[in-house]
Amino acid sequence: MASDLSPVEGYTSVIPTKLTLDSRPWDPPAEARGIFGGFLLAHSIRAGQETLPRAAEFSVHSLQSAFLRKGTTDSKLLYHVDRVADGRTFATRLVRAMQDGECIFTALLGFQKRAAPPAAGGDASDVFRYELRMPEMDGKSPLELPAGYEGFKNYMGVPPSVVDALPSPFEWRSLPYEPAPGDDPTTFRARSFVRSPRLSPGAPRAVHLAALAFLTDIWLLTVPHLATGAEYGRMPGGALGIQITLNHSIVFHDPDARADEWMVCLR
């Protein structure tokens, strides 16, 4: 039932048809120029996954996208999926988000067949695995840190209405910024723990990966302001500025990653 879904499952879901539609609109704040890009990223993954002949055997492993026009909440989004290639181990989909007859977003998605788990006592050497060391979190656990977006309110002039209107399907626990905003921007780090509320029982991997795609766009454009100490909505010299995303790329290294378990986000 819909009531059993976590917020991020609702935000990232689509309605399967010959053309896939978005199923959960969101009203952006007055200060925003269009709908949040995370919706388009997540919806494109879900729409592409719906067209795979053996969807349960494949997971998205790469996304390269371009934001072409701003979207609105005044009309539905339609996702056109081109089946570019279907192979035994890889598949490619080109997804176009259409609104009022215009293409506002494109995504080229690569899907990879899930590696078979080794038999009991077997050798897993045919699967190449590697990882980066987790960033140092000052010895803190997530629940030792303050929760939410409250730290952004009025920070560098960020209007509280912008913060309150953002979709909040994730729980954030953040460390203090290093170094302080306005110092050397090339050494700036924003470190957080993040997770979504528990997803519904049996939620497929595609839901978790779409949720992670949604996550990658949250507060991403604020990083330059945080690093330089510039006032929200203005360039470092004080001139008015507009923040927009033109393209966005993601590589999914772990098809079993869960959006509802604690992760570390380093920006």
Image (spheres, rainbow, N blue to C red):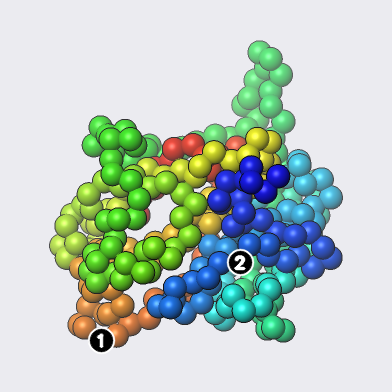
Which mark is first along the chain, 2 or 1? 2
Dot 1 falls on a residue whose secondary structure is loop
| Identity of the residue furthest to the bottom in this view | 239
Residue at image coords 51%, 77%: 34
Kindly check if marks 1 and 2 are in contact, taking CB atoms under 8 A apart as contact.
no
Q: Nearer the viewer, mark 1 or mark 2?
A: 2
Q: Give the x, y percent position of residue 257.
A: 56, 39
Q: Looking at the rendering, which quadrant does residue 69 occupy?
A: bottom right
> Residue 149 versus residue 91: which sits nearer the camera?
149
> Residue 205 versus residue 87: which sits nearer the camera?
205
Q: Give the x, y percent position of residue 223.
A: 32, 63
Q: Is residue 34 above or below residue 180?
A: below
Residue at image coords 40%, 78%: 31
Mark 1 residue crowding within 10 angstroms, few (<14) / some (14–19) / many (20+):
few
Q: Which amino acid does label 1 sit on?
A: Ala
Residue at image coords 38%, 69%: 162
Q: In this view, does 127 lie to the left or right of 56?
A: left
Q: What residue type is labelled 2?
A: Pro
Which label sits on residue 239? 1
Q: How many labels does the image show?
A: 2
| Identity of the residue furthest to the front in this view | 3
Q: Mark 2 points at which residue?
A: 25
Q: Give the x, y percent position of residue 93.
A: 73, 61
Q: Is residue 162 above or below residue 192?
A: below
Residue 84 visible, this orientation:
no
Q: Looking at the rendering, which quadrant does residue 118 occupy?
A: top right
Q: In this view, does 197 lie to the left or right of 160?
A: right
